[in-house]
Amino acid sequence: MTLRPLTTIGFDADDTLWQNEQFYRLTEQLFTELLGDYAEGERISERLLEAEKRNLSQYGFGIKGFTLSMIETAIEITQGEVPASVIAQILDIGRDLLSHPVETLPEVKETLEALAGRYLLVMITKGDLFDQERKLAQSGLGDFFDAVEIVSDKTAVTYRRIFSKLGDGPERAMMVGNSLKSDVVPAIAAGSYGVFIPHALTWVLEHVEEPTEAPRFRKIEHIGELRPLIEGLS
């Protein structure tokens, strides 16, 4: 009896299943406008990115950490003189980000519908627990997934654990996502296939070189190309 080469497929969520980064960019634009009297927009964005880098280990990924980083940046930019009204506005735009409607990306539903039942589908995402659960519920995609894993970070250890616990091990699994750093490179290091679907907007901290020499690296232009790719592995 020949074993199927692939039994489990993991999917990233933000900017793979639905839009995400574009809303962060819009929020950052509002933030720089709020502090426009204190510094140039480019400098404000640079300081915000520095704050996000510093705070990842403490706050993790997600909107709440981003909001705290905006407040920290506002305090730094104004040398501690940021008005309370500006802090209140920062909190407001953070709340708006937490309640933004979910916009599913093209061909996602059709692809998941075609794969569900044939493969074990797992959503593997970073970010705030409540926010990711909210987006999954609003997306209408929840019924396609056999399991959902909301993790603090995505490493080779993360993928080995998830694919061994839920599936037949990382060697018979695939991870699909828009981030080379989080979705593709560590999945390949774990022994899985890593499928890269570029998104027009990807957070700068998620950029790394494509592992083009890795035998299990694949790249497609959109999620609608995933089914033919999978069929080619059989």
Image (cartoon, grey):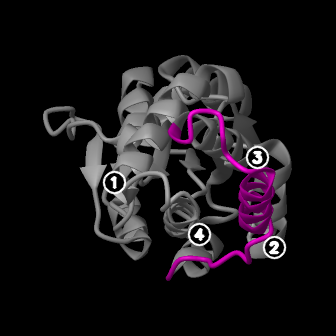
- Residue 38 position, x and y percent, is 48, 52
- The amino acid sitting under disc 3 is Val
Q: Which residue is mark 2?
A: 138
Q: Earlier in the sequence, mark 4 or mark 1?
A: 4
Q: Provide the residue span drawn in magenta.
A: 77-106
Q: Earlier in the sequence, mark 2 or mark 3?
A: 2
**Residue 33 versus residue 209: which sits nearer the camera?**
33
Q: Which mark is residue 18?
A: 4
Marks 2 and 4, how far apart in space?
11 Å
- The amino acid sitting under disc 4 is Trp
What residue is rendered at 67% in x and 42% in y?
A: 71
What residue is rendered at 62% in x and 54% in y?
A: 119
* Residue 149, picture quadrant: top right
Question: Is residue 226 in view from this perspective?
Answer: yes
Q: Which residue is mark 3?
A: 148
Q: Which residue is mark 1?
A: 42
Circle 3/circle 1 CB separation < 8 Å: no
